[in-house]
Amino acid sequence: MARPSGPLESPTRFRIRCWSYDQTGSLIASNDNWRDSQEAQIEATGIPPTDDRESALVATLVPGEYTAILLGKNNTTGTALVEAYDLDSTPASQFANISTRGLVGTGTDVLIGGLIVSAEESGQANVIVRALGPSLGGSGVSGVLADPTLELHDKDGDILAANDNWDDTQGGIISSTGLAPNDANEAALFITLAAGEYTAVVQGANETSGVGRVEVFNIP
């Protein structure tokens, strides 16, 4: 079972650091400083933020798609991290996928998505990891990353797999999942991961920049 991810396959409890919206765009809950509300519930999870100015929410979510939005107070900007933790111990409760959109810069200003494969059930997960850019323009996003590249790293920082254009190496298996990117310049990987922590890194080919999205899909 891969964690974290996005649409839910059964009702479950989550701790989310941000504003949370359901699939209709309706606001479910919001928070600025995590101690202002749900302090006891958040502390009980064992993973409260380390700074009182950081945000957190505990919510029970029914199956569906959800969006967490992270903003800087008073229109401030900077590097930040948005996280979702599955608090349910039952294997039937799991993420189906996660996606994060952000500005991909050059050098160390990359877009990063982290995931954890739990040791429950088989202790491994088949996943599709995607890096999107050009296709985001169809959703009205401007300044998209024209040619995203993708790397998947283990917890030690070693590269397990990498891809530039998704159809170059694993086109057949990626297409068979129904999750092939819509643009030939977008990147994707299919890989079986053992229990552990992993990081997907999105960059622009030839030091280009723009808005991109990193996604991870749990493949049953």
Image: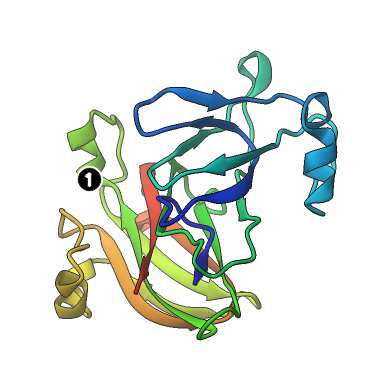
The answer to whether residue 49 of the structure is visible from this angle is no
Residue topped by disc 1: 134
Residue located at (71% from left, 33% from top): 55
Rendering coords of residue 7 (x, y %): 40, 50
Rendering coords of residue 15 (x, y %): 66, 45
Residue type of the residue flagged with mark 1? Pro
Question: Quick one: SS at disc 1?
Answer: helix
Query: Who is closer to the viewer here, 131 or 84?
Result: 84
Vertical position of residue 18 compared to residue 163: above or below: above
Rendering coords of residue 58 (x, y %): 67, 40
Residue located at (28% from left, 31% from top): 141
Vertical position of residue 101 compared to residue 7: above or below: above
Apparent side of residue 212 relative to residue 73 in the rendered image (left or right): left
Residue located at (51% from left, 43% from top): 61
Apparent side of residue 2 relative to residue 81 in the rendered image (left or right): left
Vertical position of residue 214 compared to residue 162: above or below: above
Rendering coords of residue 57 (x, y %): 67, 36
